[in-house]
Image (spheres, helix red, strand yellow):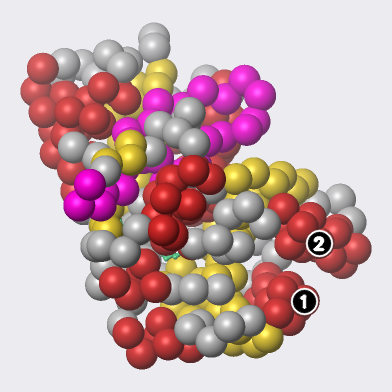
Amino acid sequence: MKIALVADSSANKHTKPGLSVGYAPMKIVTEETEYIDVPDLDVRKMMEEMKAYKGRSGTACPSISDWLDAFDDADMILGVAITSGLSGTYNSGCIAAKQYLESKPQAKVFILDSLSTGPEMQLILEKYDEYAKQGMEFEEICAAIQEYHKHTHLLFSLESLDNLVKNGRVKPIVGKLAGVLGLRMVGRASTAGTLEPLYKGRGEKKAIQNIIKEMESEGFQGGKARITHNFNEPMAMELKKVILSKWPGSEITISENTALCGYYAEMGGLLIGYEDI
Ligand code: X90
């Protein structure tokens, strides 16, 4: 039986060896260019071009046929989508699933609404992979992943919320907090799958302290943490170091955001997904 792990590209390219994911690409669009969030897109070049670009820009969720391509004719499809609170991606994934089942009624498809994005989706994909490798049945996997999802979280640290505000993903008043040079906002994915500001402070050091404080109060106990960043490896490494000194034995990876998270988290932005088990 062929099993496919699928996600939209906001999950970012997965770096775990042996884990293969079919990505339904999101798009970043300007009045002149369309960047498709595929694994080999040059994200730095895109960010530089966007910085120089003065016109309007936005994003688009994967189409139904993008999802169907990612399903790859598999018999069991285990998927995860960016929060339905901010994107139509989950909805298009569900329509794709319905169409897929019409043409392949014996297949099994489940797509989880992550109520989050990026590195929290990586944790979900890794867990699907574990379940699939253990030979668990489809129904068992669906129940277990929803249970696991209750124990995963997303925090972020952003220097600018301009693209989120411009695209109506946060209220302008929230965006203003991070508008001042050197100020960083630390926030989390709310239970409704929207962006919830928690702290603002000057500099990366303060942001890291706030992230640690939040991880502790949400019950992190030295399990997995997945850090993704926008060309800010020093901050990611520092955060990893601080987590390890407080919770030795934590299993932490660092990787780069691809285009969708890159566009919204903006230069220097950092996301962290972690589990509280
Ligand atoms: O459908 C589309 O066009 C995509 C819209 C995506 C909007 C939000 C992307 C957020 C990316 C920024 C910080 C994390 C916020 C998490 C809130 C749940 C990353």
Dot 1 lies on which element? helix
Dot 2, crowdedness within 10 Å: few (<14), some or many (≥20)?
A: some
Q: Quadrant of residue 156?
A: bottom right
Amino acid type at mark 1: Lys
All told, the count of numbered labels is 2
Establish if 140 lies above or below 258: above
Establish if 19 lies above or below 228: above
Could you tell whether 121 is left or right of 249 in the image? left
Dot 2 lies on which element? helix
Could you tell whether 24 is left or right of 206 in the image? left
Q: Position of residue 245 (x, y in %)?
A: 90, 63
* Badge 2 vs badge 1, beta-carbon distance below 8 Å: yes
* Residue at image location 46% in from the left, 68% down from the top: 189
Q: Nearer the viewer, residue 139 or 209?
A: 209
Could you tell whether 258 is left or right of 193 in the image? right
Q: Quadrant of residue 222?
A: bottom right
Q: Position of residue 192 (x, y in %)?
A: 34, 70
* Residue at image location 33% in from the left, 75% down from the top: 165
Q: Which residue is mark 1?
A: 205
Q: Which residue is mark 2?
A: 238
Does the image show residue 110? yes
Question: Of marks 2 and 1, which one's residue comes earlier in the chain?
Answer: 1
Bounds of the magenta segment: 8-32
Q: Position of residue 268 (x, y in %)?
A: 60, 63
Quarter of the rendered structure image containing ligand 1: bottom left
